[in-house]
Image: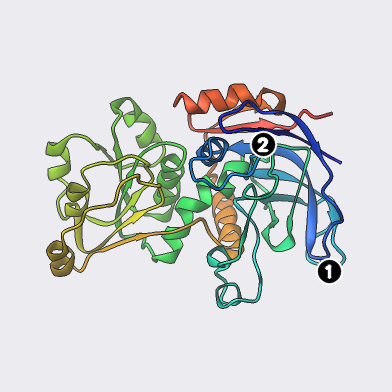
Amino acid sequence: MIRAYAAHEAGGKLRPFEYEPGELGPEEVEIDVQTCGICHSDLSMLNNEWHNTVYPLVPGHEVIGRIARLGDSVRHLAVGDTVGLGWFSGSCMTCSQCMGGNHNLCASNEQTMVGRHGGYADKVRCRAEWAIPLPEGLDRKKAGPLFCGGITVFNPIVQFEVKPTDRVGVIGIGGLGHLALQFLDSWGCEVTAFTSQDSKRDEAMAMGADHVVNSRDPAQLEKMAGSLDFLLSTVNVDLDWSQFLNALGPRGRFHTVGVIPSPIPAAAFPLIVGQKSISGSPLGSPATIRKMLEFCARHGIEPVTEHYKLSEVNEALAHLAAGQARYRLVLENDLA
């Protein structure tokens, strides 16, 4: 029996919940949950904003824990290993994307809290390839958000071969953006932070930004024209995207990992003459997650976190919904 916290209706409070997971599959592992990060996607699923929530819902997809049980076919992990589990909990392993190493693009991938129960629990299961061992040097209590927020912003750095000599901008210095600043600074880039809150200027500079620009000041944005090679947007609000696209130099790329609510308007002529691109990406493959974790351990990169007990999950979610989180929230399992 797995003990958890679940919501039984859209917008409902999470309450204690138990379920029987059935037999462990031959290619699965069961993880004893130690911590689970809270992500804004958890709120979206709780409120059924994406119209794919199945209730009762056990949220959670930023798990850190120890392997408790192994399926009969699992050979590369051992009971007691400390691992992390993020948004994806399974992929088919046979399609062209999986065979090419792009498991995160598998058309039939399984998502940890979509149509199944997630990590706000004492145990959670996944296919073994998505249980990623943590390297030495990472703080187990803080590492959970790397498996969603971290890999979301690290993946495009790798996929689009951002170079240490590149001039890169990050829009939105929150749960995603504060990690992007740290990654890009350690990558060697010249980094500009775009934020609507001048109060975050000093924090952004401390996290690796070389410059800070107010994202809602047209005069400041105009001064950025043609200056950036890569622009990473982490926000889920509408902005004046024409000014941000204007900030790109020749062959520059605007890349979004935030779910912007409205279509991004883009005039064709500036894209053509500047050979500019607009793109997006979902999280990352198991191999890229491993690379990110090693990079974090090498450079001392970690999320800025606030901590709650799992039994305080409703208070933690209210704190996030109020926009008060700085910058990621982590639940510590107290289901004894």
- Of the numbered discs 1 and 2, the one sitting upstream in the chain is 1
Nearest the viewer among 207 and 171 is 171
Query: What amino acid type should be assigned to the residue bearing mark 1?
Result: Ser
Q: Alpha-carbon distance for marks 1 and 2?
A: 30 Å
Front residue of 24 and 33: 24
Say if residue 98 shows up in the picture.
Answer: yes
Provide the residue designation for mark 1: 73
Compared with residue 162, is residue 214 higher up or lower down, i.e. above or below? above
Quarter of the view holding residue 189? bottom left
Query: Does 141 appear above or below 66?
Result: above
Label 1: few (<14), some or many (≥20) within 10 Å?
Answer: few
- On residue 56, the disc is none
Q: Is residue 295 left or right of residue 170?
A: right
The mark lying in front, picked from 1 and 2, is: 1
Residue positioned 55% across, 69% down in the render: 102
Percent across and percent down for residue 85 are 66, 50
* Residue at 40% across, 44% down: 181
Residue 299 horizontal side relative to residue 214, left or right: right
Residue 237 in the image, given as x and y percentages of width and height: 33, 39
Q: Secondary structure at mark 2?
A: loop
Label 1 with label 2: CB-CB less than 8 Å = no
**Viewer-proximal residue among 132 and 281:** 281
User: Position of 312 compared to 272: left or right?
Assistant: right
Residue 31 lies, with reference to residue 217, above or below; the image says below
Query: Does residue 325 appear in the picture of this structure?
Result: no
Residue pointed to by mark 2: 141
Q: Secondary structure at mark 1?
A: loop
